[in-house]
Image (cartoon, rainbow, N blue to C red):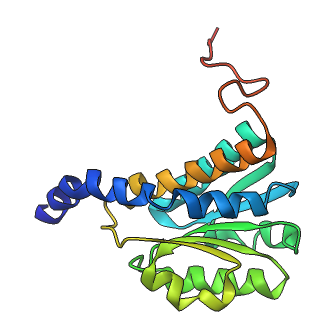
Amino acid sequence: MADHSLALRHLPKVASDILNHDDAIKEIAKDVTHVRDMLYLGRGSLYPIALEGALKLKEISYIHAEGYAAGEMKHGPIALIDENVPVVVVAPSNDRLFEKTASNIQETTARGGKIILFSDEAGVEKIKDQTSWSVKLGEVHSFVAPILYTIPIQLFSYHVAVAKGTDVDQPRNLAKSVTVE
C-alpha cells in the first residue's frame, strides 16, 4: 500500500514530465495523418487505454481505429495488419507480460506493420529494432500506469486531428451528452 501512496504522490510530476514529449508525439502524428485505419494494442490494465486511444482517434480525426487486448491479436486483428495500418502499442517494460507484447510486435512487423510504441526507456530499448516510432516515457508504477499512459495516447489523437485539419473542439456527429429514454 505504501508503494501505491508513493506512486500517487508522484503522479503530478510524472504527468508533467510526460507533457515534455508533446513535440515528439506531434512529429509522429504528422507521419500518420494519411492512414485510413489504425490498431491499438494494450495488455492488462492498459487494454482500456488502447480502447480509449482508438476511440479518441476515431472521434476527432475520423480515422477508423480499433483497440484490442494484445493477447487477442491472433483472433482477428492480425488479419488487418499491413504496411498501411499502423499499430499503436502501449507497453511499459515493468508489465509482467511485456515479453508477450514484444512477441505481438514482432508478429506485426513480420507482416509489414508499422509500430508506434509508447513505453519507458527499457521497453523502447528492448524492441527498438521492431518499432517505426517510439515515445520513451519515464518508468512508472503499474498502479498509476493507466492514468499516465492516457496522457500521451490522447495527445497523439489530438495531434493527428490537428495535422489533418479537423475541428477538435467540435467533432462532427458527436454530442457532448447522451440522453437515455
Residue 26: where, in percent of width, then height? Answer: 63, 57
Residue 174: where, in percent of width, then height? Answer: 72, 24
Please give left or right for residue 117 compared with residue 13 in the image. Answer: right
Above or below: residue 144 compared with residue 76: above
Give the residue drawn at x 68%, y 87%.
130
Please give left or right for residue 21 compared with residue 143 in the image. Answer: right
Residue 68: where, in percent of width, then height? Answer: 66, 60
Residue nearest the viewer, comparing 20 with 54 = 20
Q: Quadrant for residue 108, please give it.
A: bottom right
Above or below: residue 177 compared with residue 18: above
Q: Quadrant of the C terminus?
A: top right
Q: Quadrant for residue 168, please give it.
A: top right
Please give left or right for residue 179 compared with residue 48 in the image. Answer: right
Above or below: residue 111 compared with residue 25: below
Residue 80: where, in percent of width, then height? Answer: 86, 67
Above or below: residue 143 compared with residue 126: above
Please give left or right for residue 104 compared with residue 152 in the image. Answer: right
Give the residue drawn at x 27%, y 56%.
13
Q: Quadrant of the N terminus?
A: bottom left
Give the residue drawn at x 78%, y 23%.
173
